[in-house]
Amino acid sequence: MAGERRWVGAPVPRKEDAALLTGNARFIDDLEPVAGLRHAAILRSPHAHARIKRIDVARAAALPGVYGVFTGADVAGLINPIPSAVRAPIRNYPIAVDKVRYMGEPVAVAVALDRYIAEDAIDLIAVDYETLTPIVDPEAAMAKDSPLVHEEVGSNVVHRRGFRYGDPESAFAEADLVLALRSKYPRYSSTPMETYGVIANFERQPERYTIWANFQGPFILHALMSASLKLPGNRVRIITPPASGGSFGIKQAVYGYMVLLAAVSRLAGAPVKWIEDRLEHLMGSSCAADRADRIEAAFKKDGELTGLRFMNLVNVGAFVRAPEPASVYRMQASANGCYRVKNIFIENVLAVTNQLPVGLNRGYGGPQFYFALERMMDLAARKLGLDIAEIRRRNFIRAEEFPYHAPAGSHYDSGDYHAGLAECLRLADYDSLKRARDEARAAGKLFGIGMAAGVEPSGSNMAYVTLAQTPDERAKAGAKSGALAVATISIDPSGAVTVRTASTPNGQGHATVAAQIVADALGIDFKDVSVVTEIDTLTSAWSLASGNYANRFASIVVTAIAEASRRVAEKIRVIAADQLEVAPEDVELVGGNARVVGVPEKSLPIRRVATQAHWHPAGLPEGVSPGIYETAIFSPPSLGAPDASERVASSLTYGYVIDLAAVEIDRETGRIEVKKYVSVHDVGTVLNPLVVEGQIYGGFAHGIGAAFLEEMVYDANGSFQSGTFADYLCVTAPEMPKLIVGHIMTPSPTNPLGSKGMGDGSSMLTPAVIGNAVSDALGIEDLTLPLTLNKTWDLANGREHHRATVARPRVGAAEPGIGAGALTGSGTVELTAPPAEIFQLLLDPTFLAAVVPGCRELTLIGPDRYVAEVTIGVAGIKGVYSATMEIRDKRAPESLRLVGRAQGALGSGSGEGRVRLAPSATGGTVLHYDYAADVGGKIAAVGSRMIGSVARVLIGQFFRGLDRKLAAGKESGDDATSSQRSFLARIFGGDKK
Amino acid sequence: MLRRKPGEKHRIELTVNGRRMAGHAEPRMLLVDFLRHELRLYGTHVGCEHGVCGACTVIIDGRATRSCVRYAVQCDGAEIRTVEGLAAGEDLNALQQAFSRHAALQCGFCTAGILMSVTQFLAETPRPTEAQVRDMLSGHICRCTGYEGMVRAILEVAHSSAEA
């Protein structure tokens, strides 16, 4: 490396920005890489759990502009299931075959001239489902008599392993204080603003799939995709677009769709493009696993933490998609956190349920881990009468102990946690903050302070995932290890410098930082370095760890860049030395020149020296190869396979984060005001402060979202309820608390720059810090996130909070005895016709078809049984529903009961209602109705409040129509009453949407 | 009220970034799809297609508008500004430069819409408070930045143009 750092460490604005700020950057949906693209739309399951009895694609396939409609059976005939790290006999196809196992699972794919037609086509696909009992709760899923997500497995528990490090039994036996804490952590997603996008093209001669996708890696998944597509790796070409609109881990899971669209391209005989919409993304892409964990801790009287037990229960959703079960193993080697504790027991259990399969998400396993461990530390401090800072100070690994060998295998590279803590307390003005708490409490206010500290493992060793296997299984499968990073630097015949990183960033600024490193190494200007970060697996240098995850850029990829730079610099020095007639070690690269050390006037432009390697190879010094093209492939040698006692060095660098928050809770509104938030980070050498700050603020926003707002909610039927950005709430600018950031810098010895991976840290710690502060304010230990206004109000006012999964949309208060549907309502209307007449009209199908808004057909199929086809739109989502209705318990002219089911591409519903008729004082009728219905599918996902309000609107419309008809005269009175039926049809059929 | 037949394509003429343009759209075609796929202006991005995230915001006749909840046929004759029209030639304008300087973007996917909202906002509110800026930004979702850089960039631009 050149000695001087001119660019590394400077707040250099990013190379990426100009294209992004002018609308010039190209994302996957902006690409048309081959002519003749067709567009795909995916029909998804409206049910959490159902058997597919029949799929009729005839009407869809006949629609003009449609090139083909393909089902799971078509796709399964072409590909293998995608392999998984868990050995259970689960057949994971990227589209449902025989059975649907989560709402949103792909069921069929339509390929058409454009996306509008493709979406029309999926509305015309008829699927006959036999619904099965949904498995929603992971704890209930473990019961012996639970229905099964995968019958072949024989259980919903698909993985269970226990681990013991040190001597946890003795630690707990000899403890002065043993504490236990339940740690439930919700399911959420970092929802990148750009959704998934895939373009797939199958070619013959040779048979090859080319797949463009905003995939982020890890490219170990390329091997799985090849296996599934039944072709060798060089026939599955993956190309990432120049720009990717965020990921935070989520775009790892696009690989299932890459396989699906590749197969569909082959079936359709054409290149196919699929751009996911937001509703699909929320219900059908990926998310972090929700957990139902339990942590136990053993303490000595003086606060020393001597033992930990983790009982982790992971809800992986319907399939164990690679790299799961990695999320629960990511933190295992660092299960001691920042502490000196040696004795640790860990049990990891994976349960499958009828929910979206989980995958990478910012912090990957870290937020869940720290929510347990760090809440335990604050709890222990309170129980032991220690300050929350003091208990950490007493347990922190000391600065002189680094590098530190953690009990479960991590090698902590460097750090000074005590310095970080001191800085955090200083920035927080901790003593006056505690006084403020005393004063607030004296004034009757709810004020709390919470802390959390944690390491940020970065640069993952592929081997940690193999902890999911027993040592025997690992031995059989062959050892795995490493974290290969690749970088190529070339100087072309014009003298231009190009860096290729194969790091597939999703917005972090890799190109900028790579250019900073290379500019320093070659003594050239930052602007003279071009960087290519995307991958083409057929032409790029890459390996299985390539990609963008686990903070690997600043921990490992930078080493490959530095090594390739070193080689290029060395070559330039050797060529320059020959021309300058000095030894290579006497040549330095500065300011774009190769010059003799101490004799600055003896110099040559680097560009001129470098181009000689192309233009005049015969003139190169002996032993110097022509051209300048250096590829460095690096894997840290310390990242080995798990040892016999299941210890593994799971990451390369361990930055750390120490956070403190103070909150005040308003009893009246449930609002939690963050009065102060301090976050101290040690990321080793800061390569670019702008980039580092951006990651800290961004990670903090994810942490705040997780703490207060974000949750993917499923109801008791497994219907997804958070299907729009109006229902799944992301943090916006006014909700962001002020953040005070501090830095400690202990350079990492693991790479030549001293940098550590970063980006996840705040997202891992913030939920725990807020949890602790709220817990302190309320004096409540058992908290679950998100701390919404409703939940916090309940907690602050001593009420039991009903989880959002149980709280359902309510249109009005239903009377008891009508059932417990998700959608309930009731009301009373006065009509001018007498009850007998109204009752008769309610039974008359002839008029119903005419007056039910959106009713295309209404057919009598038996005594008091009808089939209707209705079109209903909710907030711009219009769909056709097929409804069956039955009238039961007729007691003319007083009451009747209606039972119905409706199904359409956008969702399904079932329910029942009661209608009671009584004579009014004016000779008319007082009609009372109440109903209860369950709604599923996209329509349920787009939001309870829309469904509720649409139901109200339709009821209103119906009665207005009815009144008009009645007023229009006797001969049209029949019409009027039939419109009343239409209202019922809508209630029980389509109107639930 | 103007009625349009479903399935039939209509000719739409409008001004985009000062240039007269024309294309065809079915009544159901969203403005954002028309801009991207008919006029081939890919700078405007689709984030949610249901009017919440703000990524697709453009300025229509002087109003910042989500182009995913507007039909193209509604915009016949309109004057539209998109992100492609912000820079002066190859030079970034003051707002774009400030966004870069303050790390107000990372992946940049939401940025086009935010720049358009801010452009209109600053035209109407040349000297905003931080609270006003944050309130305006609440119409947008950015998952990368935590909004901090944006707030700083917008306040700086407002401050410097107020001084000028």
Image (cartoon, grey):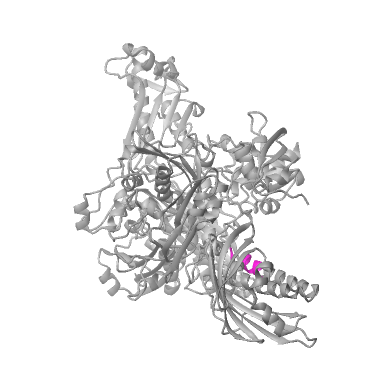
Q: Nearer the viewer, residue B66 or A866?
A: A866
Residue A480 x %, y %: 25, 48
Question: Which residue is more in the foreground, A518 or A368?
Answer: A368
Magenta stretch, main secondary structure class: helix
Q: Nearer the viewer, residue B14 or A364?
A: B14
Q: Is A134 on the left or on the right of A817, as rendered?
A: left
Residue A666 visible in this rendered orientation of the protein: no
User: Quadrant where the N terminus of chain A lies?
Assistant: top left
Q: Is residue A788 above or below residue A228?
A: below
Q: Quadrant of residue A943?
A: bottom right
Taking the image as shown, residue B11 lies to the left or right of residue A388, namely: right
Give left or right: position of A357 versus A507: left
Q: Write down the region rendered in magenta.
A: A943-951
Note whether A917 is above or below A736 in the view shown: below
Task: Say if the magenta span includes residue A776.
Answer: no
Q: Where, by quadrant of the figure, is residue A972 drawn? A: bottom right
Residue A31 image position (x, y, % from top left): 52, 37
Asked if the magenta segment contains residue A944, the reply would be yes
> What x and y, as percent, mark residue A72?
40, 54
Is A707 situated above or below B135? below
